[in-house]
Image (cartoon, helix red, strand yellow):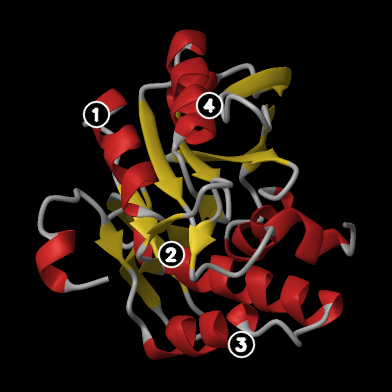
């Protein structure tokens, strides 16, 4: 996608060389399930590093084996990870590697093949939802319907701080989420050209869920 076409999209593109290299490997149709799954986890961890760079810090006094010192630590910000089932599970593990103390919720949505609209079938979230920053993960931001619906649900449940983390987006999906949730930052590794008539991202990488779990 050209820079001119990206100009009207409110989205953060994580262009770290390792992220872009691993994404290229994932796009290749010959990449098998094992490698695809491992690459997705690695990219999710790298991208989570990027989106957490502004977490608040506080000064604390500690003692090293050599001497006392004043250092920094996270200022009590509670984090949560919410994969959109099922493909989001492939990113959740990568984010948890970086933030192992995070709580994990789950939102189950599927896209109706005829209407392309999201249908909710499951929702389980941490009890202290209003006190956490939530990272919603889903590899593909295609039409944007499922992501927008998941963000709607989180807000209705009381979430006040949310970030959407995806691997590949279509411009249509970014615009949908921007319009429904202009307050929520979107982080992606790439914004591709468009959606095809079946609602798949072009060039994309195929059906992420099928490639993660080896299904058809």
**In terms of sequence position, does the residue under pointer 1 or pointer 4 come before the other?**
4
Identity of the residue drawn at 52% across and 17% down: 153
Spatial CA distance of label 2 from label 3 is 43 Å
Tell me whether the residue at label 4 lies in contact with that at label 3, contact meaning CB atoms closer than 8 angstroms.
no
Residue corresponding to mark 3: 25
Q: Is residue 175 above or below residue 101?
A: above
Horizontal and vertical percent position of residue 11: 25, 53
Horizontal and vertical percent position of residue 206: 65, 65
Identity of the residue drawn at 38% across and 69% down: 190
**Pair 2/4: label in front:** 4
Q: Is residue 80 above or below residue 126?
A: below
**In terms of sequence position, does the residue under pointer 2 or pointer 3 come before the other?**
3
Residue 154 in sight here = yes
Task: Assess disc 1: are there few (<14), some (14-19) or many (≥20) residues with their C-alpha within 10 Å of its C-alpha.
Answer: few
Secondary structure found at label 2: strand
Q: Quadrant of the N terminus?
A: bottom left
Spatial CA distance of label 2 from label 4 is 41 Å
Task: Assess disc 4: are there few (<14), some (14-19) or many (≥20) residues with their C-alpha within 10 Å of its C-alpha.
Answer: many
**In terms of sequence position, does the residue under pointer 1 or pointer 3 come before the other?**
3
**In terms of sequence position, does the residue under pointer 2 or pointer 1 come before the other?**
2
Residue corresponding to mark 4: 150
Task: Assess disc 2: are there few (<14), some (14-19) or many (≥20) residues with their C-alpha within 10 Å of its C-alpha.
Answer: few
**Pair 1/4: label in front:** 1
Residue corresponding to mark 1: 179
């Amino acid at each position: 996608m050209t820079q001119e076409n990206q100009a009207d999209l409110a989205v953060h593109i994580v262009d770290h060389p390792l992220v872009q290299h691993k994404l290229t490997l994932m796009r290749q149709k010959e990449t098998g399930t094992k490698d695809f799954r491992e690459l997705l986890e690695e990219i999710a961890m790298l991208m989570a590093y990027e989106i957490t760079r502004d977490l608040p810090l506080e000064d604390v006094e500690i003692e090293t084996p050599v001497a006392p010192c004043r250092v920094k630590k996270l200022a009590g910000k509670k984090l949560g990870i919410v994969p959109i089932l099922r493909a989001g599970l492939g990113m959740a593990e990568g984010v948890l590697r970086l933030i192992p103390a995070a709580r994990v919720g789950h939102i189950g949505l599927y896209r109706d093949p005829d209407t392309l609209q999201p249908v909710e079938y499951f929702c389980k979230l941490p009890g202290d939802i209003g006190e956490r920053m939530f990272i919603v993960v889903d590899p593909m931001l295609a039409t944007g319907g499922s992501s927008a619906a998941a963000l709607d649900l989180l807000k209705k449940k009381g979430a006040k701080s949310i970030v959407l983390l995806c691997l590949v987006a279509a411009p249509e999906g970014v615009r949908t989420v921007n319009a429904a949730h202009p307050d929520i930052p979107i982080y992606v590794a790439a914004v591709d050209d468009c959606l095809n008539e079946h609602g798949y991202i072009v060039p994309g990488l195929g059906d992420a869920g099928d490639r993660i779990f080896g299904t058809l």
